[in-house]
Image: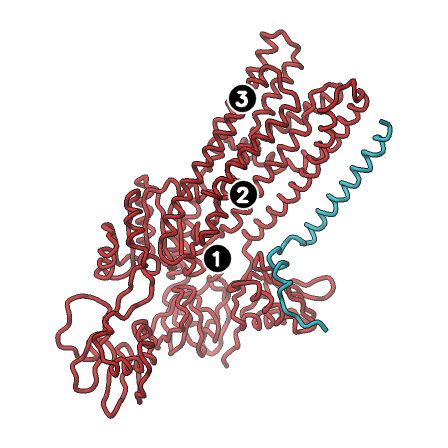
Chain colours: A cyan, B red
Amino acid sequence: MDILSYLIPIALVMGGLWLAGFLWALKSGQFDDPEGAANRILEDEEIL
Amino acid sequence: MTPQAITDYSGFIRPQKDGRHHLHLAVEGMNCAGCAFKIEKALNANETVAARVNVTEKRLTLTWAGDAAMGNRLVESARALGFQFSAIRQTADNDNGRNRALVRYMAVAGFASGNLMIFSLALWFSTPETMGVSTRQLMYWYSALISLPAVIYSGQPFFKSAWRAVSHRRTNMDVPISVAVILATAMSLFETIRSGAHVYFDSAVMLLFLLLVGRYLDAKARARANNAAADLLSLMSGTATVLQGDGHQRIPAAEIKAGMVLLAAKGEKILADGIAQGDTLIDAAALTGETLPQTIASGGYLLAGMVNLGNPVQVRVEKPQSESLMGDIIALMQKAEQGNAHYVRLADRIAGWYTPVVHALALATFIGWWGFGGMAWQAALLYAITVLVITCPCALGLAVPVTQVVAGSRLFRQGMLLKSGDALERLEKVDTIIFDKTGTLTTGKIIFENRADFSGEELSLVAALASHSRHPLACAVAGVAPVNSVTDISEIDGKGMQGVYQGKICRLGSAKFLEVAALPDDEKMELWFASEGQTPKRLIFSDTPHADAIETIIRLKKRYRVLMLSGDRLPVVQTVAAQLGIENFYAGIDPKQKFALIEGELKNGHFVLMVGDGLNDAAALTLATVSMSPSSAIDITQNAADIVYQHKGISSVLTALDTAHKTQNIVRQNFALALGYNCLAIPLAMAGLVTPLVAAAAMSSSSLLVIFNALRLKGK
């Protein structure tokens, strides 16, 4: 099971990247306005 | 000379590093996302401006290049679209910050427990023979590496809350949770170091994760509970223009004194009770919900909270803000809100005896194994800690929040907005219901009753005269028939309307105006109409109760005491009470008296549900054990209520009470399930039969059981 000694760290790092990404998204306000984001697609806007 | 007064937000405008300025404000009057986009479009039309409206939180974020004062003009242009802007309340900001912190804790705990479970699966389904001792050790160490930071970080809300309770010599649900998590983690670390097998990292972290989920659900449900008194305060804050000698000066609202003369510009809010020094048009929506502008003649009374819609008017102040009607109501609400903070939630009350019992059992386990079983103290301690871990209230922590969230969504489907979970707890205890009359029990609309007594021509004349008046009774008849061409219509202040039709003078107004000879006995709302030479005829008006009111009251009276309060005159209130079958009623009551009445009921040990819709109900709503208000009520009253209902009529009250009983039953079942599960697990733990696998399985399955039981509320 020697393979585990580098597989586990790789898995943990990947998971850690996810956590870091999620916390960044949370901090930058991606989750602040779920209703606004949902409705924004329905808005009519002129596309130039 | 008249200053174009725009509300000054400069206190909130902040410069940014890139030379732009930004401004955050709370927005009111948005009914849907479309409104938000309307505001954004209007503001973004200016190229230097970036505007974003957060629909969920009802906030406007504005940045622009240019001078700071431009911010005021920008907000004014948005205000012209029909929305109101105000400072963001500190409590709302705090709530948002807390929720975000909870999500962070959840994310970390979730990440940790997911990874820990992967290790645990491998560990549980293998033995030292199949996996190899060194590999198992490696996995334990990785588990420790993941758990320790996760516990230290995500455990914070529990540790802090437990510490606060203990330092005040109290206990709450977070005390056993914190003790169990800390002990489990410490013990597991100890075991890992000395290569033992009793490692409970996964249980400890999973426990934290599930409890954080419960806490987050709870916080979301509470997010809508607004601090109502603060809303009123923001309505009263700002600066006013005082006329002094030849000049004028802006002073803070709090410094307004009786005798001062204020100048209220067009669109400006009146900040103190006083006498109008000129004719004007005002909007009293914040006070009465009346959307039609009202004319106030010179000498008429103006109240703080009204908005001046007409030309600038001078106001001679009669009372400083603190003594104004608004001020009184604010003071009462603040007093009531302080009282509310003492309600101890069911979960915390259970924790009160749960904690000592569980700790006593753990101690008994330790003493039993070490003293009588002859085991080494480390092993005995291990068993004792296992008892604490397995009795840890995972399901107990979820039992209440999950149920309340399901109950809240069920109420939502029935047209009710539940502001806070414990409103349901309080609703279940209610034994007395107090209703406001106008707008709550009655439709609040005035109905013209005896239309049949008038001919078509007479009705047209009445409509023609009435359409020129703003009097509430006139508005009720203005649409009763197509309008005739009546000329020379004029309003005689305080008396009625007069006009000329086919050469004859017609009048519509009070009995005195039409010189009615024989006044009728009953005190119904009335207007009189006559053409020149004719005997005046009477128009009778009434305020009808909602269609479902009578039946709902009958059903409510079976289980509760029902009272009615009203500021209206006694005869009118008596009529409505008789119609609805309410024996206990009070008429002519002002907000202070309403408050005192409820205080009296509470002192007598009653639990009061207050249902009301007006500004004069706001303080009573805050004080009552639990309160409801229709969505037709003004904003402030809706904010003060625990539940806001959309359906017309009062059947929602029955529905809410019924739901509250069902919810509390399920909560009690959940507690029983959670405790029952613990009762099974404790003997096992005390006997030393609990392994980490058993502990994790017990916790997860008891939590699932509790959640599924809560979901039963959806279908009932």
Q: Is residue B17 above or below residue B205?
A: below
> Mark number for residue B680?
3
Tag 2: amino acid: Asp
Q: Nearer the viewer, mark 2 or mark 1?
A: 2
Tag 3: amino acid: Leu
Q: Nearer the viewer, residue B656 or B363?
A: B656
> Mark number for residue B218?
2
Q: Is residue B470 above or below residue B271?
A: below
Determine the CA span between mark 3 and mark 1: 50 Å
Tell which subunit mark 3 falls on: B
Q: For the point 27% across and 89% down, which residue is it? A: B500
Q: Which residue is mark 1?
A: B231
Q: Nearer the viewer, residue B651 or B185?
A: B651
Tag 1: amino acid: Asp
| Left or right: B328 as drawn, with respect to A30 | left
- Residue A15: give x, y in percent of width and height: 76, 40
Q: Is residue B448 above or below residue B147?
A: below
